[in-house]
Amino acid sequence: MNDKETLRKEFLMRRNCLTSDEITEKNNVITEKLIALCEGAGSVFTYASGAYEAGTFGLIKLLIAKNIPVAVPLVLKKEKIMKFYFISNPDDMKPGTFGIFEPDITGRYITEAIPDENSIILVPGVVFGRDGYRIGYGGGYYDKYLTRAAAKLNVGVCFDFQLIKSVPFDDHDVRVDLIVTECQDREVFA
């Protein structure tokens, strides 16, 4: 196993040991911080959280209630890419690739979303380094997307224990600009 795989396995095990009460408590704080951060955004591109992940469903509902456009990703496995689509309601999503909620683009008025200089992209990860690099789930979807996205801010979202001094990274890995945990916002400096 390489260093990335070892860290991924270790932090997934640690994350999966959290109780539902711990997750709820941490997610409430993270959601408050993200709402404050996203208040002036033109649009927010966010992942739809899976079990044990820093949650985004409460955030999605609050952003929609504040009329801030929200886009969630759809994974295109054959092309090995993902595209984001605007949703107007959490019901616009259904379980998709890897069992993660994705926009249901069949028979609905859901349009593809392209980030601009007023967009904020929320990025999931298994473990983040304080330098902004991350280890995700191994598919490379976010790194590919962030390489071509022109957002105002790329924000890593995780629980505080998932933030360590550094993680191994490759040339194709893309850093986030800021990391938000339940403990504090941590700016990332080059």
Image: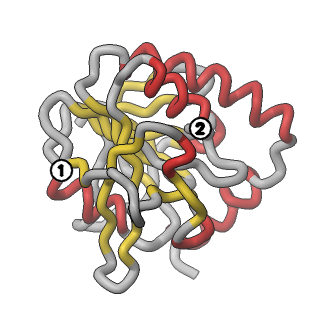
Residue labelled with disc 1: 149
Q: Quadrant of the C terminus?
A: top left
Is residue 7 visible in the rendered structure shown here? no
- 16 vs 25: above or below: below
Q: How is the image coloured?
A: secondary structure
View extreme (front): residue: 107
At a point 62% along the width and 37% down the height, the residue shown is 159
Q: Give 153 or 162, whichever is nearer the viewer.
A: 153
At a point 71% along the width and 49% down the height, the residue shown is 52
Q: Give 44 or 146, whichever is nearer the viewer.
A: 44
Q: Quadrant of residue 57?
A: top right
At a point 49% along the width and 49% down the height, the residue shown is 92
- 128 vs 108: above or below: above
Percent position of residue 151, x then y: 19, 39
Left or right of residue 109, residue 163 in this image: right
Q: Which mark is residue 57?
A: 2
Left or right of residue 36, residue 80 in this image: left
- Secondary structure of residue under mark 2: helix
Left or right of residue 120, residue 9 in this image: right
Q: Quadrant of residue 44?
A: top left
Q: Quadrant of the N terminus?
A: bottom right
Nearer the camera: disc 2 or disc 1: 2
Callout 1, which amino acid? Answer: Ala
Callout 2, which amino acid? Answer: Phe
